[in-house]
Amino acid sequence: MKRLLRYVLNIIASLFILMALSTLISLIIIPSSIKTSKHIETLFIDSAKHIRSLDHVPTEKEFYQWANQNLSKSRYFLNLQFHTLKTNNNTLEIPENEFSFSLWRGEWYEHYYSWKKEKSTLATEYSDYFLTGNVITDFILFFLIAFYLFKFSFKLKNTSIETHNKAERL
């Protein structure tokens, strides 16, 4: 039983070591992701500003006509989806005179909701990518968890050796 527990603890500790290392490696990838997120956020905000400048929420046709003229330079333009109370097919509760956008990023959708203080699901800051909000703190936290799991596993091994030695002496 102790052997199985040690084995499981070592696997979990190894995963925490990998998580610690991945936090450092992520520093290479995150700037590109933030740049993309900010570009998409600009697309959302520009679209929302246009809609807010109108005296009504446009139809899909009206929105896409405007978008074709004003957003077509963005590589994400073709993935932008516009939703209103009339177009959403009951998949999302959209209040009257409000709207939302969704955009497929290749692996997941990003969303923008006009009625939620005009917030999106985009991660645009380094702190958005880390458990504690800080890469160094995450690295230290994961490393310490791994260290203490390995240490506890080693103690289990030593106590089982001592117990075995005592049994042999009797």
Image (cartoon, helix red, strand yellow):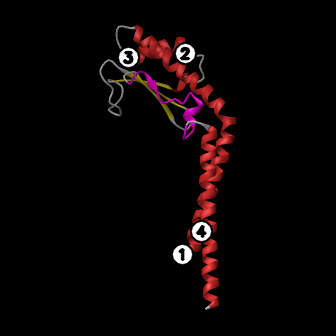
In magenta, the rendered stretch is: 116-132
**Mark 4–mark 2 CB contact (< 8 Å):** no
Mark-to-mark CA distance, 4 and 1: 9 Å
Mark-to-mark CA distance, 4 and 3: 62 Å
Residue that carries the numbered disc 2 in the rendered image: 71
Q: For mark 2, does the 10 Å Cα neighbourhood hold few (<14), some (14 to 19), or many (20 or more) residues?
A: some
Q: Residue at x 35, y 32 (%)?
A: 92
Please tell me whether residue 84 belongs to the stretch shown in magenta: no
**Which SS class for mark 4?**
helix
Q: Residue at x 54, y 18 (%)?
A: 42
Q: Earlier in the sequence, mark 4 or mark 3?
A: 4
What is the three-letter code of the residue carrying label 1? Met
**Which SS class for mark 2?**
loop
Where residue 94 sits: x, y (%)? 33, 26
Q: For mark 3, does the 10 Å Cα neighbourhood hold few (<14), some (14 to 19), or many (20 or more) residues?
A: some
Which quarter of the figure has residue 23?
A: top right
Q: Residue at x 32, y 24 (%)?
A: 85
Q: Quadrant of the C terminus?
A: bottom right
Where residue 147 sits: x, y (%)? 64, 56
**Which SS class for mark 3?**
loop
Tell me the number on the disc at residue 1.
1
Identify whether 17 is placed above or below 154. Answer: above
Tell me the number on the disc at residue 135.
none
Residue that carries the numbered disc 3 in the rendered image: 59
